[in-house]
Image (cartoon, rainbow, N blue to C red):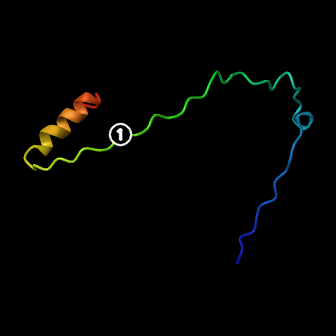
Amino acid sequence: MQAKQKPTDTLALSDLGLSTEEVKATQEVMGVEPVPAKEGGEIVEDPGEAPSRVVEFLTKAKVI
């Protein structure tokens, strides 16, 4: 059974009492750069070393 869709109204600028000058973009895209590749994670084999490595990681990330 398909859900019912609520009808949508399309309004023009004149319907809202606006002119094209009043709705100009206020920001400009200066450039787009690709996201850098993600580095692989680190596996800690020694359970006794894990807490100190986590604290070191969080300190480096300026979380704590």
Residue identifier under label 1: 39
Helix, strand or loop status at disc 1: loop
Taking the image as shown, residue 39 lies to the left or right of residue 18, namely left
Residue at (28, 27) in percent of width and height: 62
Image quarter of the N terminus = bottom right
In which quarter of the view is residue 56 placed?
A: top left
Q: Nearer the viewer, residue 12 or 32?
A: 32
Instruction: Give x and y (percent) for residue 18.
Output: 87, 29
56 relative position to 32: left or right: left
Residue 22 picture location, percent across and down = 83, 23
Outermost left residue: 48
- How far across and how far down the image is residue 30, in percent? 64, 21
What kind of residue is marked 1? Glu
Residue 21 image-quadrant placement: top right
Residue for point 40% across, 40% down? 38
Q: Nearer the viewer, residue 24 or 32?
A: 32
Please tell me whether residue 35 is drawn above or below residue 8 in the rendered image: above
> Seen from this angle, which residue lies furthest bottom?
1
Identify the residue at image location x=89%, y=31%. 17
- Identify the residue shown where x is 79% and y is 24%: 24
Count the marks: 1
Decide: few, some or many residues near mark 1? Use Cα within 10 Å; few <14, some 14-19, many ≥20: few
Is 57 situated left or right of 30 in this image? left
- Quadrant where the C terminus sits is top left
